[in-house]
Image (cartoon, coloured by chain):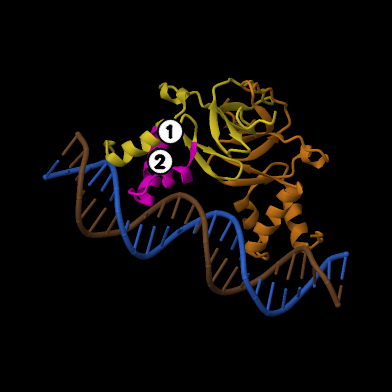
Chain colours: A orange, B yellow, C blue, D brown
Amino acid sequence: MNRRKTPSKEKILAILKSQGDAISHETITNQITDINRATIYRILNQFCEDGIAHRIIAENGKQFFALCKTCEVEEHHHNHLHFQCNTCEKVECFESEINISLPEGYAIENFNGLINGYCNTCAPA
Amino acid sequence: MNRRKTPSKEKILAILKSQGDAISHETITNQITDINRATIYRILNQFCEDGIAHRIIAENGKQFFALCKTCEVEEHHHNHLHFQCNTCEKVECFESEINISLPEGYAIENFNGLINGYCNTCAPA
DNA sequence: GTAACTGCAAAATATTTGCATCCTT
DNA sequence: AAGGATGCAAATATTTTGCAGTTAC
């Protein structure tokens, strides 16, 4: 299962990189006309598998993908906190750490949070 | 749009109530043989719309539904923290409050977090 | 009686897979 | 040359919708 460098992968990677934030599957496919639907799914899944990108699932169930800075480090700590603006629907990755206290006997392995609200551009004055 | 009390709704509500935790759509439909697929979707969507239940989307994109205690109060504060066990796949609602610090200019309206880990039953000793 | 609810089938979506072919290494 | 990658079409899975018949109020 050796991964190969292909134009399709590079193109999708470039799209992900161009966007500082996370982008929806839909947005990705909209920017692509010359790669097959199935291939896009395969590549995105592969990126997630390989830890190159990660998948965010928004309130509405839609998938977003992002290259988080924390993931570029080898040992991703999987403490993802994301933010989605209710107005512009943009999704961003936040770096802030979070403190979670669990009940007795529970162990945490991974955390995934999505904040909905208004970003600095869309926030009401 | 006046809601009516029907056997189908009561049955689904009973299933949700019987489970202290959140249950997947699949689990719900598995327990039901005499209600149509479409009807189940409609009822669950209605419950979420009406604030009777809420929808949790797990890592794998699967939907879970729960009657959270915090939602029974009229003003739900939408500060949901959920936990899914990696072993038994059970999903629970946690009540603990969370402190989130946002960047300048951002406003939070809703938070939804999913912790993955091991519950007190499945946690490795 | 009226409008909400339901079942059924079909439609709309979303995602995956088999297979032949192509391309990277 | 070998096997990963791709396109295409078809298969799956998931959720919604139109419509006619049924039921709660």
- Relative to the observer, which residue lies in front, C4 or B107? C4
Q: Amino acid at mark 2?
A: Leu
Q: Are marks 1 and 2 on the same chain?
A: yes
Q: In this orientation, does residue B112 appear?
A: no
Picture coordinates of residue A66, whole percent (x, y): 70, 44
Q: Which of disc 2 and disc 1 is earlier in sequence?
A: 2
Tell me the element at label 2.
Answer: helix
Quadrant position of the C terminus of chain A in the picture: top right
Chain ID for label 1?
B
Which image quadrant is residue A110 in?
top right
Give the CA distance from mark 1 to mark 2.
8 Å
Q: Name the residue rendered at 45%, 32% in the picture.
A: B19
Picture coordinates of residue A40, whole percent (x, y): 67, 59
Query: What is the crowding at mark 2: few (fewer than 14 residues within 10 Å), some, or many (at least 20)?
Result: many
Chain ID for label 2?
B
Q: Is residue A54 above or below residue A85?
A: below
Task: List the residue tagged with mark 1.
Answer: B53
Q: In this orientation, does residue A102 appear?
A: yes
The residue range painted magenta reads B23-51
Question: In the displayed image of the protein, which residue is found farthest to the front?
Answer: B125
Which of the labelled discs sits on residue B44, or is there none? 2
Picture coordinates of residue B51, whole percent (x, y): 41, 31
Mark 1 and mark 2 residues within 8 Å of each other at the beta carbon: yes
Query: What is the crowding at mark 1: few (fewer than 14 residues within 10 Å), some, or many (at least 20)?
Result: many
- Relative to the observer, which residue lies in front, C23 or A89? C23
- Secondary structure mostly seen in the magenta stretch: helix
Q: Amino acid at mark 1?
A: Ala
Tell me the element at label 1.
Answer: loop
Picture coordinates of residue A115, whole percent (x, y): 60, 31
